[in-house]
């Protein structure tokens, strides 16, 4: 049986047509472009096509170190399929856990600095809503002081009201803003 096997292997090694590569190196020269196309046809792995070709040929060379390869192209094709399977497994194990269905999004933990940024933005939105809900004159006095930086006396002169009235509007604005913020947080 072993003599029979040797004859079959010898026949495979010496293709009468002379068109088939006889070594892994020959197969690399003829098959590399085909393998690149094969690997690029996989949408998740297309960006790794050249690396996968190299990996396939390295595996084939390692395989051929201690055995004789009679059909290098067949070996390369079989190894190429194994490389795709391995990369898909690696892709799934490294990427699937990073994708979360949208219904679980509120439960995704965020970094403390991000959480502070989110809370600050939410607080600013709540303050803006509270300011928007102030009576017109109270809002105007409050914004002249807090946003425009005017002194109480300048606000009084600008609006034609007393200094005490300006103080009252500022106090009223602060009181209403605090009440609305407490109410919103209590919800």
Image (spheres, grey):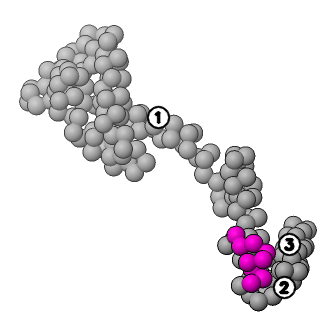
Q: Which mark is residue 162?
A: 2
Question: Residue 46: horizontal and vertical position, in percent?
Answer: 36, 46
Query: In front of the other: label 1 or label 2?
Result: 2
Q: CA distance from mark 1 to mark 2?
A: 80 Å
User: Which quadrant does the N terminus fall into?
Assistant: top left
Residue position marked by numbered label 1 in the rendering: 86
Element at badge 2? loop
Residue extent of the magenta highlight: 149-157
Residue position marked by numbered label 3 in the rendering: 174
| Residue beneath the point at 27% across and 39% down | 35
| Residue beneath the point at 23% across and 22% down | 24
Where 153 sits versus 18, above or below?
below
Query: In front of the other: label 3 or label 1?
Result: 3
| Residue 16 appears in view | yes
Closer to us: 170 or 74: 170
Question: Residue 106: horizontal and vertical position, in percent?
Answer: 73, 59
The reply to whether discs 3 and 1 touch (Cβ–Cβ < 8 Å) is no
Mark 3 Cα shell of 10 Å, populated few (<14), some (14-19), many (≥20): some
């Amino acid at each position: 049986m072993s003599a029979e096997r040797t004859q079959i292997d010898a026949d495979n090694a010496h293709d009468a047509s002379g068109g088939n590569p006889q070594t892994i190196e020959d197969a690399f020269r003829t098959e590399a472009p085909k393998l690149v196309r094969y690997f690029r046809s996989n949408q998740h792995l297309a960006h790794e096509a050249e690396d996968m070709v190299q990996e396939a040929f390295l595996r084939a060379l390692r395989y051929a170190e201690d055995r004789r390869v009679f059909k290098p192209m067949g070996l390369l094709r079989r190894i190429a399929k194994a490389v795709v399977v391995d990369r898909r497994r690696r892709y799934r194990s490294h990427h699937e856990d990073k994708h979360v269905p949208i219904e679980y999004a509120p439960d995704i933990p965020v970094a403390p600095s991000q959480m502070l940024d989110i809370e600050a933005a939410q607080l600013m939105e709540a303050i803006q809503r509270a300011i928007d809900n102030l009576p017109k004159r109270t809002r105007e006095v409050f914004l002249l002081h807090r946003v425009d930086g005017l002194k109480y006396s300048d606000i009084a002169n600008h609006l034609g009201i007393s200094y005490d009235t300006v103080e009252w509007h500022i106090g009223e604005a602060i009181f209403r803003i605090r009440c609305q913020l407490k109410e919103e947080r209590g919800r």
